[in-house]
Each structure stands twice: as structure tokens, then as C-alpha cells.
Amino acid sequence: MVTVDPTKVADRIARPTTSGIQDSRGYRVFQVFNTVALLGVVVVTLYPFVNIIAQSLSGESHIRAGDVNLIPRGFNVTTYELVMSDSMFWINYRNTVVYTVVATLIAMVLTTCYAYVLSKRNLRGRTFLIGVAVFTMFFNGGLIPNYVLVTSLGLKNTLWAIVLPNAISVFNLLVMKSFFENLPTELEEAAKIDGLNTYKTLWYVVLPLSKAVVATMILFYSVAYWNSWFQAFLYMDRAELFPITIYLRNLIAGANSAGAGLESSDLAQVASNIQAVTMVLTVLPILCVYPFIQRYFVSGVMLGSVKQ
Amino acid sequence: MVRHRAKLTASVMVTTSALVLAACGGGDDGGGGSDEGEGVDLEGKDVGAMDDYDIGVQFTATEPLNFSTLYNEHPNYPLKDDWLFFEELEERTNVTLDLTVVPLSDYDDKRSLLIGSGDAPTIMPKTYPGSEEPFVSSRAILPISDYVDLMPNFQAKVEQWGLEDNLDTLRQQDGKFYVLPGLHEAPWQDYTIAMRLDVLDDLGLEAPTTWDEFRDVLEAIKEEYPDDYPFSGRWNVPTPGGSMLNILGMTFGTSAGWGFNHEQWDEEAGEFVYTGATDEYRAMVEYLRGLVDDGLMDPESFTQDDDPAIQKFANGRSFAIGTNAQTLVNDYRPAFEDKNPDAEIGKIPLPAGPAGNVINAASQLENGIMFSADAAESENFVAMMQFIDWLWYSDEGQEFAKWGVEDVTYTTGGEGDYQLADDVDFVSLNPDADKHLQEDFGFSNGMFAYGGSTELLHSTFSEEEQEFQETMAEKDLLPLPPPHPFTEEEREQVTLWETPLRDHTDQATLQFILGQRDLSEWDAYVAELEAKGMSQYIDVVNEAYERFESEHG
């Protein structure tokens, strides 16, 4: 057992000597600046969000007068009650959840399989398969042909119109492919010797080692689907099929167009803090996903798995 | 992702308008003849139509009919299938509507997409005049002017209210129009200036009636409050100073801001001239330059967002701001409630300018209905036209769409005296009621109810607004410019010139007003416009005007 005399340790911390490793002056200056700069970034990023929250909880006259900054003024939650009492809000909210979950699931399965295949350097036709994927990054059929295609496949007004057409994001595919390429081939060889076929190798060996990239991809896909509105706007003809993003977008457009006053006797009843309320309600769930996924962003999981 | 989306949205318009041409170029000519009503074969297309349909006759289809319709979903009154509107409509007309619901935020994009892909519903309401133009040459939409003789109410209103000249402004180069506009009995001027009437009272000032008086009033306020700008304007999107320039330009005999037209009709010369280079436009710019120069108008009036403008007004740092009837009630008065309950805010009558005490007659046409070209092939075509005529253009239909069902949603105490039922609210007329005319019944829906007689229009106005409208009704109407529709090639050509010309005009207008450029450089500015193709542009306009005049005049 090595015993440590606490007083000596304290002494060394208090009076750093010139010997031993210590932060150079330049590094400490850098740290101070770094902290200040990053705190600045935090403020810039958080301020609008806190401001939106404050607005969502403030009284209308205070918002109109521009009094609201970080703290709600004239506290009121009537708008929350109002928005939450609109059944269409919840229907569209549920749609967004369903679309996001299903779309992310499909996208993950397809992207993982494709990326795993592409990561095999000795695969015949690999260049062609990569070419096919990359081609779609630069060229597509265009809006109207796509619309005609989806319509004639009978996908319009169904969930599939949203989840199928863009199931594989080529960018995500390439990220995943290069991650798989960096996995030691020895691990897969060992799995093969132990009797696993390709699919089992993917499932039992490769995927457990790829939690970091899988978590990243889930995050990328789910945030993208959560925020997306354009596909739904194109292919959905009924309000009860819209995701919450369209609801929100329309709400804001309605509030603004009422200001332009083109519609006869169509007075604006949308208070400006309805926008803030809806934004808060829409952002919260996806915000809550981050901490749970973040713990998979671990590095060095494969440290020591292969002896060379 | 955000960038991706923004790019997509931007490309919708470009792609669709381009592809509309490609997708639909091969269609037939929609059954239209060379002149209105001539050569239109309606045989076998009158299934469900009434033989004796006329003004004052309730349209009821002789068999149940269904029409596909584009629907503009307004967030203030989300569509409900069980609205009394649809129920009663079916009962009265035997017609049901198959709705394609499109959020208001992107209505035009979706409409372009549907037309471009050949998937367009038959009836496309909420089409603003001018937005039908990209589709005209594709023959994907119906030249509706060929069929107005099926619409007795529409024709009667055009005649009674003297709207022939207004309709002419919609005509395309083939002499037909493709959008069936909403009709107003009288022009409707909503936008003007709101002022702090209590401050005017304190200083012993009268509400101004001309722009010169407006300037005098601002000067008097400036004397009392030397540290503030008495006037701080709003509505700078999409054009800087859009609303202010619009109302000012109108009364100076030109067009600017939201209402800017490149071409201006010069009555004396009998030809079009370029708006941004006219003496009238210059006079308007000089007027504003004077206001800014003397500290009477906030230089930020042309660039700031609406919110800061409202805040300045609400915090007593400005005393005049642009307004319409809605913002007066919804934005300004609530902002004063807590801070300064004694403040009195009101619209001032639109001041008169060098062009006289005038307003624009163009406001007699509203957004209207566009039809898919397939409509004319349907066996129910005649019935559909009768239905459109009844619902959108007959007195009974307009009253129904706006006020609903008598004794259910409203009561009348005689001619034009509409009262909401006790349990129904609309525009805060019955604030304690638990049902809403739009949200719960589907009436006064911007899709189906607009335009109409002045009496009907004013029936939902507050007394204050009715008074304002009465003073507006005394104003003279500006003459409408003669029609000058472009051919397809001409439109392509002028579109290339329009953007640089418009940008330069807007930019120079602001520079002159804000004093960044001296007015002595006006001639240099006109020369710059010239270099950007001003004369060529105007030549094309005058050519189009002369051609239309000789062919259809």
C-alpha cells in the first residue's frame, strides 16, 4: 500500500514547483479565453431559447410593448391551455411522433445494411454501388416527377409517402461506411471462425461495437424527420395527416398574414405568444432525447480488442 | 437540414413554373373559341344543371354532385368536416366538396405543384389576380371568360357595379381572363396612418386631411417632443417602406412600395412611362426626404421590423404609425392597456395628395377562383358554373357564406341589419359567446366569403371603422391603366429586366429619402435606370398595349 500524506499533496498543489508537469502560461491564457469564448457561445445559443420560453409565459401587452427578455412578465399560461385544447394540435403531434419513429427505424435498417455492405473492400461491384448512392446526392428527378411517381404508386396520403422516398441519406450512409471500414477485420474473422454467418456477425459483433455511430445516426435521422415538413406538405391532403411542423408553420404564417390584412373581416385572433408556446411544446421532446443518446458517444470501446 | 429545406422551398416555384410548361404543353385548348361565348360546345355537359337558373333563383343540382376543390387551411379556423356550412350547403345546393387541404403558409406552392403534375382539383379558390399568369400558356387552366354567360349573378354584378374596366386588367394577350375575381361594390381602402389622438388634442391639433397638413402636425409634435421622431413607420416586408410608399404613391398619382408597378399610364401622352422615373414619383420621394431631413420621420421607418415600430409607438416615443383596421384593434390598443390607458389611438382618413383626394380603384377586385382546364370536359360543367355563381356571386349565397343560417348563427332586423345569435362570436362582436362563427360553423371563411356589396362588407365592421369607410367612400377613384397583356416571349423578356430595374428603383428611392444620395442626382439615377433597360421595357409594354388595343379594343 502506498500511503499519501494529505498535507504534502496540498502543499504541492498550493505551491507548484518548476519541476514536474504543469500548465504553461500560454495554455492557461488559452484556457481563460476558451472559457470566455465558449460562455459567449452558450449565451448566444441559449438567449433566444430562454427568451422564447419567457415570451410563452408572458402577458400579451408586455410582449407587444417589448418588455420581455429573460424573465416572463405578466405571467400567464392561457395560451398553453388554448393550444393544448386544440385537438388538431395533438393529432398532428402524434403524427410527428409516429412519422419520426417509423421513418428513423426504416432509415436505420436500410442505411446500416447498405453501409455494412459498402464497407467490405473486397466486394465485387462495390464501386458501382457507391456510385449509385452518390449519384442521387447530385441528381434527382425533380419535384414534379417525384410527385407524380409517389402519387401513381398510391402512396399519397399515407405514412409511406413520408418515410420511404428519403429513407437513405447518402451523407449518413458514407459516414457509417467509413466507420465500419475502420473496424478491425480481425474481429469479424474471429466471429466467422466461431461460426457466425454474415448477418449474425453484423448483429452480434459489428453493431454492438458501433453504438457510437448508430446513436449518432439515430440522432441525425430523428431530428431531421422531427423537423421536416416538406414531404408531408407535398403528399398529404388532409389536415389530420399533417405533422406538427406544418401546424406550427401555418400558425405563424396565419399570424403574419393577418397583419397584412388582405382577407376581409378576418381579424387576427392569434396572439404572438402562441408562436412561442408552440415552439416550446414542439422542441421539448426532441431536446429530451439528447441526454439519453449522448451516453453512447463513447470512444475507445475497442481498445485492446486486437493484439498486433 | 435547414439549408436543405430552404433550398427546396425556393426551388418549388422555379421548378414548378418551368415544369408546368413542360408537363402540360401538349393539352388541347380547353374548348375555348376565339371570342367570349362563341364556339363553346356545352352539349351533354349540363347533367345536374338547372334549366331555369337565374338571378334570385336558389341553385339546387338536380342530382347529387361532388366537385374537387383546393382548400386553404387557415390556422384561426381549422377545417372541421361537421361544419354547418357544409351541411347546409349540401341541403341547399345538393353539392358536396371534395377538399384537398393545403396549409395557408404554402398554398401557392402546392397549387403550382398540383397544376404542374396534372393533379389539380377542379376549383381553385383564393387565387390572387396575377398569380394565374404562369399557367396561362400551359393551357392547364380554363379561360373562364368564355363561360361567364353561364353566370347570371356574376354578369349582373359586373354591370351594376361598373367593373368592366377592372375585368379588362385581368385579360391575357388572347383577350381572355383566367381567374374569376371576387367583386366589391366599392373600392376598399383599409391602410392609412394611426395617430395618438389624445396628443393631438393636447396640442390643439386637428387630424390632418392632406399630406401637407400631416407634415404640419408632425412639426407641431416635434416642437413639443424634440427628442423623438413623431412618425415611425412599419410594414417593410417584402419591400422597404412597403405600406407607407403604397398609400403615399397612390395619392401622389404614381405607384410605389407594395403597389409598385413598373409601368405608369400617362393619360396626356397616351402611352406608358416608367414609374420610377416620373415627376410624380420624384415628388413623393422629395416629400419623404423632407420628413426625414427635418427629424419628423424615423429613418428606421423603412427598414425596421414591425415589433420595434409598435414598441416605439406604445412607449410614447413615436406618435404616428402605419395601420389597418385589424392592427389598430389587435396590436396598438392592447399595447397601451397597461402602460397608458388614457391614450387614444385612431385611424386618420387617408390624407389627400397632389393627385387629389383619391384612392385606387383596383381594390374592387379581390382574390378569386381559377379552374382546371379539365373542368370544361366534365358532364357536370354547367351545373358547376351555376353552383359557383350562386355561392360566390349571388346575394343569397354571399349572405349565406358570410353570416350563415338565419336564426341559427344570426338574426336580421331588416335590410342589412345583421346581428349575431347570442351564443355566437365573431370579430369580438359577442365576446362572451361560447361558439365562434368561423371556428364552429365554418362561415365567414376566407375561402367562400369575400367581396360583395358594401352593405354586406360593412356589416361586420365596428362603428369606428364604418365611419372611416364613409370618409373613404367620398374620395375619387384613380383611373385604371388600359390592359397591356404580354405574350409568352414578352413576359420572359420583361421578367429579365424587371428584377434589376426594381432593385435599383427601391435602392435609389431609399437612398434619396434617407439623404445618402442628393436629389440633385436624380437625372443620374434616371440614366442608371436607362442602362438597366428601362426604355426597352417600356417599349415592350407600349407594344403590348397597342397590340391589345387593335385586336380587342
Image (cartoon, grey):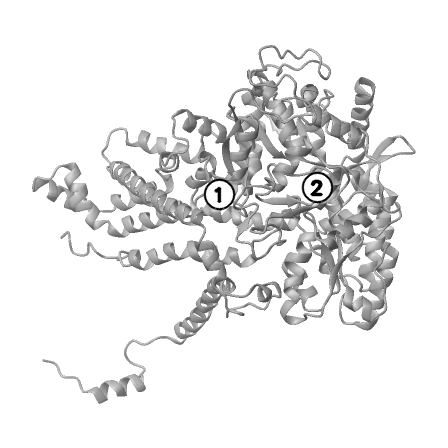
Q: Which residue is mark 2?
A: B456
Q: Quadrant of residue B333?
A: bottom right
Please name the amino acid that badge 1 sits on: Arg
| Whether residue B368 can be seen here | no
Above or below — where is B530 with respect to A219? above
- The numbered dot on residue B5 is 1
Question: x, y (%) of residue A236?
Answer: 44, 36
Residue B429 in the image: state x and y as whole percent: 63, 53
Q: Report the front residue among A38 and B79.
A: B79
Percent coordinates x, y for residue B294 in the rendering:
83, 64
**The disc labelled 2 sits on which kind of residue?**
Leu
- Is B163 left or right of B212, judged from the image as shown? left
* Dot 2: element: helix
- Disc 1 secondary structure class: helix
**If the image is split into quadrants, where does the N terminus of chain A sit?**
bottom left
Q: Chain of mark 1?
A: B
Q: CA distance from mark 2 to mark 1?
A: 42 Å
* Residue at the (67%, 55%) spot, across then down: B327
Query: Residue farthest to the right?
Result: B268
Task: Name above or below for residue A238 compared with residue B234.
Answer: above
Between label 2 and label 1, give the one nearer the viewer.
2
**Mark toward the start of the polypeptide (2 vs 1):** 1
Task: Tell me: B182 left or right of B475.
Answer: left
Q: Residue furthest left?
A: A194
State whether residue B543 is above or below residue B206. above
